[in-house]
Amino acid sequence: MINTNEIFDLALSDWGEPVTVGAVSISAIYDEPYASASPFDHGVESSGPQISCKTSDLPEGTDHGTAVVVRGNSYTVSGRQDDGLGETTLSLRTSA
């Protein structure tokens, strides 16, 4: 059986960076925002900034509105997706 925690630990060791969630510093993988629009394809794609981290690393109560700092930029959590296997993705919104 594949141990997904070991695989994610390897990913964090290669691509993880320090981020602050609430008042806690953790290691997470940051994904830049993406947007694409074309009048000829009839399609629009969009994705905001997000981080992926170990669920166990998140401070208790992390949810919508929690402050997050990545690369010196301030965000708030706009969505939380736990995969049930120990990894969480937090969707972020730029803070004013």
Image (cartoon, rainbow, N blue to C red):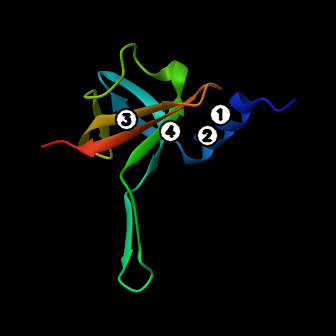
- Earlier-in-chain disc, 1 versus 3: 1
Q: Is residue 73 visible?
A: no
The image shows residue 17 at horizontal and vertical percentages of 46, 42
Question: Taking 40 as reference, is 71 left or right?
Answer: left
For label 4, the residue is 52
For label 1, the residue is 9
Give the label on residue 79, or none: 3
Amino acid identity at mark 4: Ser
* CA distance separating discs 4 and 1: 11 Å
Q: Nearer the viewer, residue 37 or 85?
A: 37
The image shows residue 85 at horizontal and vertical percentages of 65, 26
Nearer mark to the viewer, of 2 and 1: 1
The image shows residue 48 at horizontal and vertical percentages of 36, 52
* CA distance separating discs 3 and 2: 25 Å
Nearer mark to the viewer, of 4 and 2: 4
Question: Taking 26 as reference, is 23 left or right?
Answer: left
- Mark 3 touches mark 2? (CB < 8 Å): no
- Mark 2 touches mark 1? (CB < 8 Å): yes
Amino acid identity at mark 3: Gly
Vertical order, 57 against 73 (above or below): above
Give the label on residue 13, or none: 2
